[in-house]
């Protein structure tokens, strides 16, 4: 089973020449907020907590992207931050860099019949919270990278001097922002506890180490 979005009727009736022209056009590889909202992206139950946790962990500056993987309870499983190189907005390039970061920090879930983990993207940039073509390229890239890594495509969030904004949802806040100081870790963002070991031998070793 593959995951993603069904092609539109226009795409299914396009000629090879039309599809080739679209693939060569970076503007074809971006999503607008209305398209994003209509795609059924799962809503975060507490977006501010997710944003604050990622802001505290990575302390992003403008042109920094943070891709994070959340479990079904929205606990952070893995995250990576990187700086975007100056280049025209292109969803294909965004997809490639996001996929490389995901492969670096967490194994894929392609063997699962249904994705259980969700990837979200926080992008710190200059300007205001209004959607830009650069945002559209990141949104296209996130959706495609999630499909190729066996993840659900989650929220795309911008972080500017005005605050944070979940694109396509209208939810946002003034803090954190580009200039704000990191906040203490939220409980749900705490790293997972170390795995437990069981059995009599483990208990003996634990007691010996505690002496």
Image: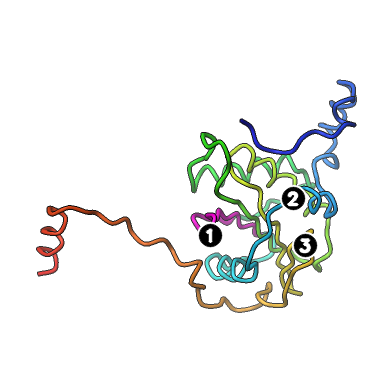
Chief secondary structure of the magenta portion: strand
Q: CA distance from mark 2 to mark 1?
A: 18 Å
Residue behind mark 1: 73
Mark 2 vs 1: CB contact within 8 A: no
Q: Residue at x 14, y 68 (%)?
A: 210
Q: Residue at x 89, y 21 (%)?
A: 15
Looking at the image, residue 51 sits to the left or right of residue 7; the answer is left
In this view, the mark in front (3 or 2): 2
> Camera-side residue: 202 or 124?
202
Q: CA distance from mark 1 to mark 3?
A: 20 Å
The image shows residue 20 at horizontal and vertical percentages of: 84, 26
Looking at the image, residue 33 sits to the left or right of residue 94; the answer is right
Q: Residues within 10 Å of mark 1 (few under 14, many from 20)?
A: few
Q: Where, by quadrant of the figure, is residue 27 drawn? A: top right
Q: Where, by quadrant of the figure, is residue 70 drawn? A: bottom right
The image shows residue 151 at horizontal and vertical percentages of: 59, 44
- Which sits earlier in the primary sequence, circle 2 or circle 1? 2
Residue behind mark 2: 40
Looking at the image, residue 142 sits to the left or right of residue 71; the answer is right
Magenta-colored stretch includes residue 67: yes
Q: Residues within 10 Å of mark 3 (few under 14, many from 20)?
A: some
The image shows residue 149 at horizontal and vertical percentages of: 58, 39
Q: Residues within 10 Å of mark 2 (few under 14, many from 20)?
A: few
Q: Residue at x 17, y 52 (%)?
A: 199
> Camera-side residue: 150 or 125?
150
Find the magenta span and give its range: 64-81
Residue behind mark 3: 169
In this view, the mark in front (1 or 3): 1
Magenta-colored stretch includes residue 77: yes
Tell me if residue 88 comes above or below residue 19 in the rendering: below
Tell me if residue 202 comes above or below residue 166 in the rendering: above
């Amino acid at each position: 089973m593959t995951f993603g979005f069904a092609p539109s009727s226009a795409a299914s009736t396009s000629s090879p020449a039309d599809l080739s022209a679209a693939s060569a056009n970076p503007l074809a590889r971006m999503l607008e907020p209305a398209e994003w909202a209509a795609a059924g992206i799962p809503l975060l139950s507490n977006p501010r907590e997710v944003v604050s946790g990622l802001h505290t962990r990575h302390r992003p500056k403008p042109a920094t992207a943070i891709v994070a993987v959340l479990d079904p309870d929205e606990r952070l499983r893995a995250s990576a931050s990187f700086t975007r190189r100056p280049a025209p907005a292109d969803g294909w390039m965004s997809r490639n860099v996001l996929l490389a970061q995901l492969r670096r920090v967490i194994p894929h879930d392609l063997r699962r019949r249904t994705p259980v983990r969700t990837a979200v993207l926080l992008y710190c940039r200059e300007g205001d919270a209004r959607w830009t073509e650069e945002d559209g390229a990141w949104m296209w890239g996130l959706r495609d990278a999630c499909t190729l890594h066996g993840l659900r495509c989650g929220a795309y969030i911008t972080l500017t001097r005005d605050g944070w904004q979940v694109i396509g949802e209208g939810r946002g806040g003034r803090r954190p922002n580009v200039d704000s100081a990191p906040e203490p870790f939220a409980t749900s963002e705490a790293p997972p506890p170390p795995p437990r070991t069981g059995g009599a031998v483990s208990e003996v070793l634990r007691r010996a180490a505690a002496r």
